[in-house]
Image (cartoon, rainbow, N blue to C red):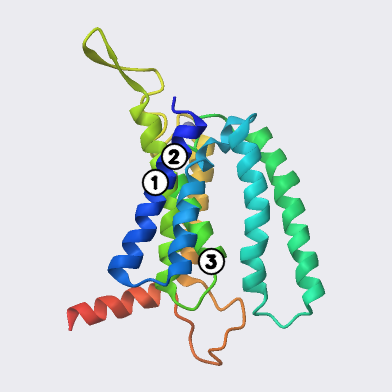
Amino acid sequence: MAGFRTHITFSAALGAGYAAAAYALFEVPLPTCVLAGGLCGVSGMLPDVDSNAGVPLRESMAFAAAVIPLMMLDRFGQLDVPTEWLVLAGAAVYLFIRFVVAAMLRKYTVHRGMFHSLPAAIIAGEFAFLLASGDDVRLRIYKAGGVTLGYLSHLVLDELYSMEWYHGRLRLKKSFGTALKLFGRNWWPNISTFAKLAILTYVVLKEPGWLPQHYGNDVRPTVERTATTMIDRVVR
Ligand SMILES: [Zn+2]
């Protein structure tokens, strides 16, 4: 099993590449590149939040509790409410993640359960997409991609570490196939994971104008509409 440090080193290196490539090749604004690269680095420890005790759960919960309210502040800032309310809402989200979510993860997750799976990697990215602010859907997809990439890097590394050389032969450990998987062995976590995936995918595609934007009565760009426009352009 790859250790915490190996995971973080690997995903941080990937994140740096992800940021540099977008900046150099696609002229993505630098702050967006740095944020997406950073998200990729941090996401390399996300799947191990199911390991209950230890560094990954504590660190990622502390980090998420600090970062998510900040990302949401930006989003809620588009609502016309007094700043004091925003600060209070941010504090409430912080406490909720730090204590309630952490306690639930500790209670309900099994190590190498569905947190170590391909659908979970997509779910993590979809969450990031919904949290990410900005009018340009492509940049939000890019930030979300950083999370999914970091998450996937963890799963790949776990699988690589489940192989070893033994007397000149490649041997598979018992953990082989438990990280980079579509389904787990128990039906309930499978159903619950795929239900979450379906709901989030629907929300991401349709993302209704749940927050007032400066588009007036105009339609907001959703992933679905952006994709349709891009396909239209290619076809014509
Ligand atoms: Zn792991």
Identify the disc placed on residue 132. Answer: 3
Label 3 – label 1 distance at C-alpha: 22 Å
Front-lying residue, 113 or 199: 113
Give above or below for 137 relative to 177.
Answer: below
| Residue holding disc 1 | 13
State the residue at coordinates (34%, 64%). 22
* Of the two numbered discs 3 and 1 in the rendering, the one whose residue sits closer to the viewer: 1
Marks 3 and 1 close (CB-CB < 8 Å): no
State the residue at coordinates (36%, 37%). 156
Image spot of residue 151 (x, y percent): 44, 45
Image spot of residue 169 (x, y percent): 22, 13
Marks 1 and 2 close (CB-CB < 8 Å): yes
| Residue holding disc 2 | 9
Query: Mark 3 or mark 2, which has the lower sequence index?
Result: 2
Tell me the quadrant of the picture where the C terminus can be found. bottom left
Label 3 – label 2 distance at C-alpha: 24 Å
State the residue at coordinates (43%, 68%). 30
In the shown orientation, is residue 12 left or right of residue 85?
left
Tell me the quadrant of the picture where the N terminus can be found. top left
Which amino acid type corresponds to the residue marked 1 in the rendered image?
Ala
